[in-house]
Image: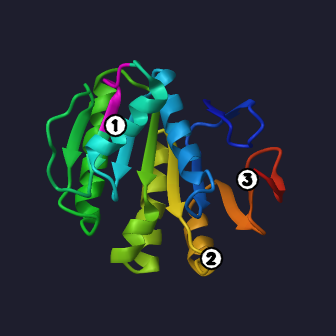
Amino acid sequence: MYPITNLCDDGDVHRVENGTNILISGPPHTGADELYLSLMAEGVTEGEGVIFITTDKSAKKVLSALSSVTGDESLSNVVIIDARSGYSSPMEHDATVYNVGSPTDLTGIGIRITTAMQYLHQRGFRQIRLGLNSISTLAQFHTANTVFKFLHVLCGRVDATAALGIGFLNRAPTDEDSIDLVSAAYDVHAEFRERDDVTESRVIGLEPELRAWSEA
């Protein structure tokens, strides 16, 4: 079981089964990206192995944002798969960084995921959080069906290895068809939206379900 805090915006600690995949989607400035980072940072503080797949920020920026949440917590249990820059600059943290040429190289990303999971398992980590930020960037380079197939394989790997998968989608109001396709790969969907200048959220797939929109 994996502890997850603030997913339902109630401050409670919920626990999800091993192999669960969670999708977080929402427009900018709604809190969706903060929730993604918070759930990933929770894995660091819980002493789990944590893998970040980043397609729109450099590894250095990811680690800077992560350390702003975890404070002085060691990041030696963190692996970054940097598919944005194709190279790494010197790190000020003790995380491990693997590089992929670009978000177009889904095969390369898949190979690095395997390498990262093997690395963490060899170091004795039996619980691993695997995060992907952002699905939106992949959608800029690939068709919706290609992205879905990649996510389907990724979520299947999470299930098979008893990990916890967390994906982030920076959604636009016109993305509804793509949202439906992407969310089909995930067990839980935490959605954010702006309505009449009010941010609302709901969670589908987590017991008890919160299908009604409520102010976030």
Q: Residues within 10 Å of mark 2 (few under 14, many from 20)?
A: few
Q: Which residues are magenta?
A: 74-79
Check disc 1 and report its element: helix, strand or loop.
helix
165 left or right, relative to 203: left
Mark 3, residue position: 205
Residue 190's spot in the image, x, y percent?
A: 67, 54
Mark 1, residue position: 63
Give the residue at x 63% y 56%. 30
Check disc 3 and report its element: helix, strand or loop.
loop
Specify whether residue 78 is painted magenta: yes
> In front here: 118 or 41?
41
Residue 78's spot in the image, x, y percent?
A: 34, 31
Specify whether residue 141 is painted magenta: no
Q: What is the magenta segment's predominant secondary structure?
A: loop
Give the residue at x 26% y 27%. 93
Visible in this render: residue 92? yes
Give the residue at x 34% y 37%. 63
Give the residue at x 66% y 33%. 5
136 left or right, relative to 19: left
Mark 3–mark 1 contact, CB under 8 Å?
A: no
Q: Residues within 10 Å of mark 1 (few under 14, many from 20)?
A: many
What amino acid type should be assigned to the residue bearing mark 2? Pro
Return the mark for residue 173: 2
Check disc 2 and report its element: helix, strand or loop.
loop
Q: Residues within 10 Å of mark 3 (few under 14, many from 20)?
A: some
Please report whichever mark, 2 or 1, sits nearer to the chain's N-terminal start: 1
Query: Number of callouts in the render?
Result: 3
How far apart are labels 3 and 1 at the CA level? Answer: 30 Å
